[in-house]
Amino acid sequence: MDEKDNHENRENNEKPAGKDADRNKGDRNNKDRQTFDWVTRRSACSLPAVFKELRSQVEQDVNTRNGLRPSYAPYEFSIADHDGGFHVFLKSKDTDKDVQLSVAFILSEHAIQVRDDKSLRMFDVTLSFNEIGECKLKVEGADREFWQVRRMALEELMFRGL
């Protein structure tokens, strides 16, 4: 047996196989759960932190949507901070009429409120921190991802209002 074979045998003997490998993986996962920094994760699951991230992602959506407009399009999307929240605007310069529609995102004490341009409630976003340490956005009791909340708020404005 040469030195290479000896080295491979030592490596194979050091690596648990089958159930031993699964047991070691389980031990490692258990240790990760025991040392899970729930305080930091829970702190990040606050309305102000989620609102800030949501605003950043909405701004990316606005930029993407504007980039998809034809060069001759008589409309444009914009985002502006306003009264403790932000608004996404659709502005259209038509020869017959000027149109301005919007969706407002407002940070309140217990929720992120989403309102249309008439200040009518579309929906509210609340948060929950679940048993496996995930921050979940909730709309009317259902867990939502950030993109789903953005779609619920902006799809009508960005695609059907034209």
Image (spheres, grey):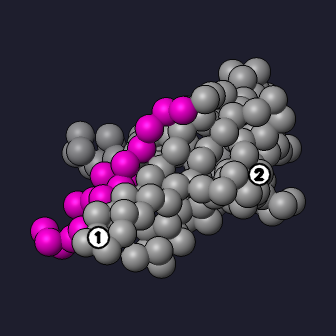
Q: Quadrant of the C terminus?
A: bottom left
Q: Residue 59, position in %: x, y? A: 40, 45
On screen, residue 16 versus residue 71, left or right, reads right
On screen, residue 13 versus residue 113, left or right, reads left
- Residue at left offset 44%, top offset 38%: 80
Which residue type carries mark 2?
Asp
Q: Residue 16, position in %: x, y? A: 58, 48
Quadrant of residue 6 within the rendered picture: top left
Q: Residue furthest front?
A: 96
> Which residue is denoted by mark 2 in the rendering?
124
Which label was assigned to residue 80? Answer: none
Q: Residue 43, position in %: x, y? A: 72, 23
Q: Earlier in the sequence, mark 1 or mark 2?
A: 1
On screen, residue 47 above or below 126: above
On screen, residue 30 above or below 75: above
Q: Mark 1 or mark 2, which is nearer to you?
A: 1
- Residue at left offset 66%, top offset 39%: 106
Was residue 63 drawn as part of the magenta stretch in this picture? Answer: yes
> Which residue is denoted by mark 1 in the rendering?
94
Within 10 angstroms of label 1, few (less than 14), some, or many (20 or more) residues?
A: few
Q: Nearer the viewer, residue 38 or 111?
A: 111
Q: Exactly how many numbered labels are in the figure?
A: 2
- Residue at left offset 44%, top offset 53%: 89
For label 1, the SS is loop
Give the magenta part as a residue range. Answer: 60-82
Which residue type carries mark 1?
Asp
